[in-house]
Amino acid sequence: MEGIAKTKTPNTSSRIPEDTVSYSILPDISLSSKTLYPDTSLHSLHLKILEIINPHLETYIWQHQPFTLSLSSNPFPHLHGKTRYGDNLEDEWFIVYLLFEISRNIPDISIRVWDSDGEFLLIEAAFSLPKWINPENSGNRVFIRDGHLCIVPKSRFETSPSLVDALGFLVSDSGECRAEESVQGAIKNRLFGFPERARVNMHRVRVRVPVSVAWVLKNEPCLIGLAVEGFYDRDIDSMKYAARMERFLSKGSGEEFVEVSVRMSRAMYAQLVQQMFQAPKCYPMPHRSDGRGYVEAELGMKIACGFEMMYQQRKSEGSDGKGSSWEVFHESLESSGYFKELLPGSNEYRRLMENAQEYFRNSSSYSRTSEMISTPVRRIDEILALPHSADDFRGVDIPPSDDDAWLYNGEDELNSALLERQKEMELYELNRKKSQKSGKQNSCNQTSSTGLNDFDPSDIAKTMQAFVQKISSYEGAEVPDNRDPTAVNLDVEHFFKDMESVMRQVGREGNDDDADVDNGSSSDMDFDDFEYESDPSDDEEKDTFMDSYSEVLNEELKTTTLEKSFVRANEQSSKKDNEGTSSTHENVDEDFTPVDVDVNLVKSLLDSFSSQQGLPGPASNLLGLMGLQLPRDTNRDK
């Protein structure tokens, strides 16, 4: 479960914007067919899908882009789409609901859905996921099939499988891939209330707008999303368009205004209401004392200004090739060093920019981008070219605005969502603790059933040696695959000569009885001032240095009890043979008796473990991390 909060989906060909959801509908027949899946069959599948989802979309207003599907041929023919939902997260989950509906009604298809967070369905069910799944191996494993969430198991593919391999296994054995009920339940809880929830997410409000705006909304109600986007994402350049209102207030003060009812999402309504915006000087507004009339006129003014800014900006971008595709292309040029770190505005920079723009205008991306940007502009021009007047809106019964208490009283809903998530976390922690407790009990039972005679102390030394030879990373200790032996470069000759100089200096100071301590050389010598040359007596000097170093070290240690705390290599055998061979050992210089490192390690760990008396402690924790379970010392209390 850990790490799923940011699972990156592999095999996505392009960078996904943070507020965009992508989805693919993959028919089974395209996997088994040796030839391309006929376009007519895909069109037939597309029509079936539209027949299923259209009843849910008749009155739904999308925040930015609608749910759309188009033909894609990579890696095989299928239907693909993406929708920008902006600040309205409900659009994304409504799409997930539609995909589940499609899956329930059409057999022999598999569906994928992902966004900039990767497999966001796994994020929603994070507290119920199997432990093995993580961001590195979750790619091409998560599908919607037969109305259920499916996860291709790790037992079939250790690492992330290819899309074709995963689909092949999913088609052959979808039952094994079906996620556990706890995971299914988490997704169902998130989709609870749809499709009714989609209707509740809509908000109807009365506004006072120019006739031109009312006429556009009457013919294309979905354009309200682009108008709100134009208002909410306005900048200094687009504000200049709103100051003139050339398209939607062409008659100036002589423009007629009408009252209409506008349908939009709750997110759009909040974006309009919550922002302060001064009406342009050319835009007539009633007095604030008008009460409800002023509120309706202010909201209508924001919508009209949003239409003007969106229309003029798209018209400008469509003519000069600007837009999101150009921005991506421009960023790629900068990252590749195309502009050679030139200052923007310089002659050479402008020349390179003109070349890049010319190249982009001749590319297919430009034609697609220009078409996409210019479509709303052309549609608005077509609508406003039709005959219309204020009389078209007079005598029409306009329903009152919906109650917007949800905008100000959302604290209870937020607290409810937080409490629900808190319960999930508490349940997850409870199950995790139970699992750990059960594991400890099983371990204790297994340990108690193991006799002391079955335990091999040499395992401790071997495991510790293997443990200390590993390196640590953010994932824990691990053995490096390709370790560079030259990562640390130590000049051994230089090091020994430096140490020898220090020891000689210390010897000279001792012979002078510290008479010249204040005038003597400092220990902070700059050894770089000396240059050493090869000498035939280097080996003899090394031996002399090692002897001197050993003598000084032994003299320092003789005044301590450190040597008594170690077990030496021949200590045990000396005890056994002490009676018959004591005269032999008397002549052995104990200073040169080696210390048995492994025996001392095992002895220290066992003493520490025994002193814990079965309670948690450093010895048991360290050994547990290395996978060792020591038997309890049952003779300690006897």
Image (spheres, helix red, strand yellow):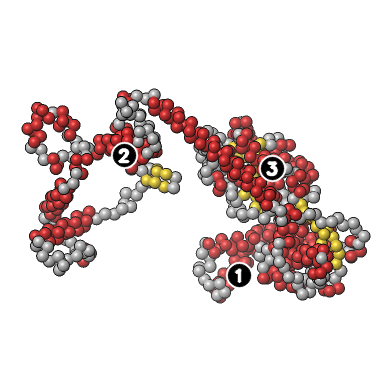
595 shown above or below 200: above
Callout 1 crowding tier (Cα within 10 Å): few <14, some 14–19, many ≥20: few
Three-letter code for the amino acid on which mark 2 is drawn: Gln
88 shown above or below 257: above
Q: For the point 9% across and 27% down, which residue is it? A: 580
Of label 1 and label 2, which has the lower sequence position? 1
Labels 1 and 2 touching (C-beta < 8 A) = no
Q: Would you identify the image quadrant in which residue 251 lies?
A: bottom right
User: In this image, 329 relative to 267: left or right?
Assistant: left
From the image, tell me which residue sits under label 2: 465
Three-letter code for the amino acid on which mark 3 is drawn: Leu
> How far across and how far down the image is residue 48, in percent?
76, 41
Does residue 534 appear anywhere in the picture? no
Q: Would you identify the image quadrant in which residue 219 lies?
A: bottom right
Mark toward the viewer: 1 or 2: 2
From the image, tell me which residue sits under label 1: 354
Local secondary structure at mark 3: loop
Mark toward the viewer: 1 or 3: 3
Q: For the point 22% across and 56% down, which residue is it? A: 495
Labels 3 and 2 touching (C-beta < 8 A) = no
- CA gap between label 1 and label 3 equals 49 Å
> How far across and how far down the image is residue 246, in percent?
78, 71
From the image, tell me which residue sits under label 3: 191
Q: Nearer the viewer, residue 283 or 606?
A: 606
Callout 2 crowding tier (Cα within 10 Å): few <14, some 14–19, many ≥20: few
Q: Nearer the viewer, residue 77 or 550?
A: 550
Q: For the point 79% across and 74% down, which residue is it? A: 282
